[in-house]
Image (cartoon, helix red, strand yellow):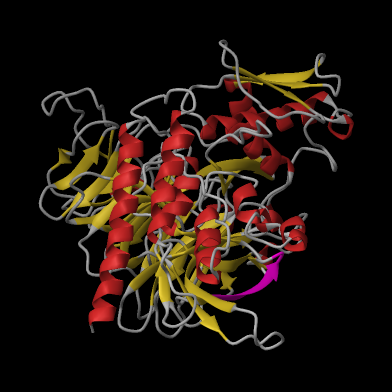
C-alpha cells in the first residue's frame, strides 16, 4: 500500500509540475513573446515533466502518460532528446511526450527511434486523437523475449486522415499498438513506432486548429472542414495559410468527395519553393502556381481564386478581400477576384429579409429583427402573406420558407399534412402534398436547389421524403445506415449536399447525424437521390434536442453532455466541437441561425417566448409567446 501511495503521489507531483511549468510559460507570453523566450520556457516545461519521470521502473504495473491539462495555445512545447543510458521506460515516456511537441517534423521524437525507424516513420499522414492519456505497460516480446516490448493503449476519440479530415470514433473503440525496443550502441531505442501521430485531446487542440476548405457542388461553394497545424514550421517556414492552401489543392475530403469537385486542374500545386503565403496591407493574397495550374481559361481561374479566397478568409481573422493567382514565374498575373466577385461565383444564398415563427394562435408570422432597436422600436410581427393569412381555421404546426422567401412549406398543427403555399399572392389553401396516416410529420426544410425535405414518423411507413422543386410528387429517400432509427427532426444545408438528421433510438434519446446527399448525374431519374455515410455530428453530447445550420458550414446544437445541463454551442459538421458556446442558453426548445453572420441567433424559450441573440450582445425577447422559430431554408 505504501508503494502504491508513493506511486500515486509521484504521478500527482508530475502532473502538478507540468501545470505549473506551463502556466509560468503562459504568463511569460501574454502577447508576442520576446525572441527566443517561448521555446526556452516551453522546453523547460517538458524538461520538468521528464525529470519527474526519471525514476519510472522499466517493468511492472500499468502506467499512464497523462495528456496536457488546459494548455494555453500560445505556449510552445518542445520535447527533450533521450538521456544517456536512459531506461526502456524513460525512452517510451520521453518518446510519447516528444510526440506532443510543436515541432512539425518531430525531430526530437525521432531521436528515440532506431536509425531505420526514424527515416521511415511518417506520422504526419494521420493523427489518432485520444480522449485521455495513454496507458503503457511492458509485455513479453514474441520474437525477441529479451528485448523490452511495450503495449500502448488509450480510448479513441477521433482520427485525422491524410487529407486532414476529422472523423469521430463511434462506440469508444480502443487504440492499441506495440513499441519494440532494441539496443543500439548501448542505448535503448524504439524500432517499431506508432503508425500515426498519437495525441490526447488537449494536445490536439493546442497543436491543430479547424479551418474550412471550399469546393464546388454544382455551382455552389461548399465548406469542407479540416484541421491544420496552428504554428509555422521554424525550419521550413511553412505557415498555417500555406498548409491550408496545400490541403485545398490536394482535393476534397473522402467524405465530401463524391459530391464535390475542385476547379483546380489535376496536378495543380504551389510554385516550387513556396513556403510562406501571406496577404499584404491591401488585404490581397498572391498565390504562385506551378505549371500544371496555370493553363486554364479565365472563368475556371476565377473559380479557383474563389475557392482560395473563401478558404483563407475562413482561416484568418482579418478581412481578406482579394486573391490573385500568379503564373509559375511567380510574377505575372493569371487572374484575380475580389470579395464581391467571388460572392457571385460562390452562389451562396441571399441574406434573409425576415425571421419566421409560429405564434400562440397557430399562425405563421414573420418579423424583421433590428439588433439596434429597443423593445419599443422593434418591428412588430406580421402574418405571413398569401393563403395562410386568410385560411380560416387552419393552424400551423411547423413551417419552412424558401431562400427567396416566395413560398412556404407548412405542416398542419396535428402533424398529419404537408402543404406548399405561395407568399406572393392570395388564394385558397391547396391540397396536401404528403399525408401521414397515424404518425406525425417533422418540420420541413428547403435546400438552395429548391427541393423540399421532410420526414414521416408514422411507425408503419416512417422515413425521409423529398419533394422535387417543392411541387413534384414526394419521393422516399433511401438513408443508408439509419438502421431502424426514427427521424424526429431534419435540416438540409444551404449548399444542398448535406442534411442534418435528429434521430431517436430505442428509449427516445435523440442524437444528431450528418448525411451526404447524392444526386444522380444528368437529367435522368431524379428518384434515385439518396443519403449516404451517416456520421455523428455531436458525439460528445449524450442527447441533442434542437439544431440548426450556422454560418461557414457549422451547426448550432442544443443538447447536453453526459451528466451535464442543456447548453447551446457550435459544432463543426465533421463532429468535432468548436469552443464557442452561447451564453445563458438554457430552457431552449428550438434554435435557428442564418448564413448571414450579422443576423441574430433566434430561439424559442420555455419562459420568454421568441428570443434572439445579436452578435456580441445578450439574449433579448423578440416576441412574447410563439414557437418553432426559423430563418429561410
Q: Nearer the viewer, residue 477 or 597?
A: 597
Is residue 178 within the magenta segment? yes
Is 66 situated above or below 374?
A: below
- Residue furthest toward the top? 282
Counting from the top left corner in percent of width and height, residue 239 is at 61, 32
Location of the N terminus (image quadrant): bottom left
In this rendering, position of residue 333 left or right of residue 205: right
Residue 17 colored in magenta in the image: no
Q: In this view, does 188 lie above or below 519?
A: below
Q: Quadrant of residue 236?
A: top right
Q: Quadrant of residue 601?
A: top left
Displayed quadrant of residue 304: top right
Residue occupying the point 67% across, 89% down: 142
The span shown in magenta is: 176-185
Seen in the picture, residue 591 relative to 239 is either above or below; the reply is: below
Identify which residue is drawn at 28% across, 52% down.
Answer: 568
429 left or right of 204 in image: left
9 or 236, nearer to the observer: 9
User: Is residue 217 positioned above or below 13 on the image?
Assistant: above
Residue sitting at x 26%, y 73%: 6
Q: Foreground residue, 618 or 396?
A: 618
Decide if residue 208 is on the left or right side of residue 27.
right
Picture coordinates of residue 317, whole percent (x, y): 46, 27
Left or right of 544 on screen, residue 531: right
Query: Is residue 202 something one can see in this rendering?
Result: yes
Q: Residue 363 at x, y = what percent?
A: 24, 50
Residue 25 position in % (x across, y down): 36, 38
User: Looking at the image, which residue is at 85% across and 24% down?
Assistant: 328
Amino acid at each position: 500500500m505504501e508503494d502504491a501511495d508513493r506511486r500515486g503521489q509521484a504521478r500527482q507531483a508530475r502532473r502538478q509540475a507540468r501545470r505549473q511549468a506551463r502556466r509560468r510559460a503562459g504568463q511569460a507570453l501574454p502577447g508576442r513573446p520576446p525572441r527566443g523566450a517561448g521555446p526556452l520556457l516551453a522546453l523547460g516545461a517538458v524538461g520538468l515533466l521528464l525529470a519527474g519521470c526519471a525514476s519510472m521502473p522499466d517493468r511492472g504495473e500499468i502506467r499512464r502518460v497523462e495528456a496536457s491539462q488546459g494548455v494555453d495555445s500560445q505556449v510552445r512545447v518542445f520535447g527533450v532528446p533521450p538521456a544517456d543510458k536512459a531506461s526502456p521506460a524513460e525512452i517510451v515516456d520521453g518518446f510519447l511526450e516528444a510526440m506532443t511537441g510543436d515541432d512539425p517534423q518531430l525531430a526530437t521524437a525521432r531521436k528515440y527511434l532506431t536509425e531505420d525507424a526514424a527515416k521511415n516513420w511518417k506520422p504526419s499522414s494521420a493523427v489518432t486523437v485520444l480522449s485521455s492519456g495513454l496507458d503503457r505497460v511492458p509485455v513479453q516480446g514474441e520474437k525477441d523475449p529479451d528485448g523490452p516490448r511495450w503495449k500502448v493503449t488509450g480510448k479513441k476519440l477521433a482520427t485525422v486522415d491524410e487529407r486532414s479530415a476529422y472523423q469521430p470514433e463511434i462506440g469508444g473503440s480502443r487504440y492499441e499498438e506495440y513499441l519494440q525496443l532494441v539496443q543500439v550502441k548501448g542505448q535503448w531505442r524504439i524500432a517499431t513506432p506508432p503508425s500515426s501521430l498519437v495525441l490526447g485531446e488537449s494536445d490536439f487542440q493546442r497543436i491543430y486548429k479547424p479551418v474550412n476548405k471550399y469546393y464546388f457542388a454544382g455551382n455552389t461553394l461548399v465548406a469542407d472542414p479540416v484541421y491544420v497545424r496552428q504554428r509555422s514550421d521554424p525550419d521550413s517556414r511553412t505557415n498555417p495559410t500555406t498548409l491550408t492552401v496545400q490541403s485545398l489543392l490536394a482535393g476534397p475530403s473522402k467524405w465530401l468527395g463524391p459530391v464535390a469537385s475542385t476547379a483546380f486542374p489535376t496536378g495543380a500545386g504551389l510554385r516550387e519553393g513556396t513556403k510562406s503565403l501571406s496577404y499584404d496591407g491591401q488585404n490581397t493574397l498572391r498565390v504562385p502556381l506551378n505549371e500544371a495550374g496555370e493553363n486554364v481559361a479565365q472563368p475556371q481561374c476565377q473559380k479557383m481564386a474563389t475557392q482560395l479566397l473563401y478558404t483563407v478568409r475562413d482561416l484568418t481573422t482579418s478581412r481578406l478581400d482579394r486573391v490573385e493567382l500568379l503564373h509559375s514565374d511567380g510574377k505575372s498575373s493569371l487572374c484575380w477576384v475580389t470579395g464581391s466577385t467571388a460572392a457571385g461565383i460562390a452562389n451562396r444564398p441571399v441574406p434573409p429579409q425576415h425571421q419566421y415563427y409560429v405564434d400562440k394562435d397557430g399562425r405563421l408570422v414573420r418579423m424583421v429583427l433590428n439588433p439596434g432597436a429597443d423593445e419599443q422600436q422593434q418591428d412588430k410581427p406580421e402574418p405571413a402573406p398569401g393563403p395562410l393569412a386568410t385560411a380560416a381555421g387552419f393552424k400551423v404546426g411547423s413551417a419552412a420558407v424558401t431562400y427567396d422567401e416566395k413560398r412556404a412549406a407548412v405542416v398542419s398543427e396535428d402533424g398529419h399534412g404537408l402543404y406548399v403555399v405561395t407568399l406572393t399572392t392570395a388564394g385558397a389553401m391547396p391540397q396536401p402534398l404528403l399525408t401521414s396516416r397515424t404518425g406525425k410529420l417533422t418540420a420541413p426544410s428547403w435546400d438552395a436547389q429548391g427541393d423540399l425535405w421532410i420526414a414521416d414518423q408514422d411507425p408503419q411507413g416512417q422515413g425521409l421524403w423529398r419533394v422535387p422543386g417543392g411541387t413534384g410528387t414526394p419521393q422516399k429517400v433511401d438513408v443508408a445506415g439509419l438502421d431502424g432509427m426514427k427521424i424526429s427532426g431534419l435540416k438540409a444545408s444551404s449548399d444542398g449536399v448535406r442534411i442534418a438528421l435528429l434521430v431517436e433510438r430505442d428509449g427516445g434519446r435523440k442524437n444528431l447525424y450528418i448525411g451526404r446527399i447524392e444526386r444522380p448525374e444528368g437529367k435522368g431519374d431524379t428518384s434515385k437521390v439518396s443519403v449516404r455515410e451517416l456520421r455523428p455530428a455531436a458525439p460528445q453530447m449524450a442527447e441533442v434536442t434542437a439544431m440548426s445550420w450556422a454560418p461557414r458550414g457549422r451547426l448550432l446544437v442544443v443538447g447536453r453532455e453526459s451528466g451535464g445541463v442543456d447548453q447551446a454551442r457550435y459544432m463543426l459538421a465533421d463532429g468535432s466541437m468548436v469552443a464557442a458556446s452561447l451564453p445563458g442558453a438554457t430552457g431552449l426548445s428550438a434554435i435557428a441561425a442564418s448564413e448571414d453572420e450579422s443576423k441574430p441567433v433566434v430561439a424559442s424559450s420555455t419562459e420568454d417566448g421568441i428570443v434572439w441573440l445579436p452578435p456580441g450582445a445578450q439574449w433579448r425577447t423578440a416576441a412574447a409567446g410563439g414557437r418553432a422559430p426559423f430563418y429561410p431554408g
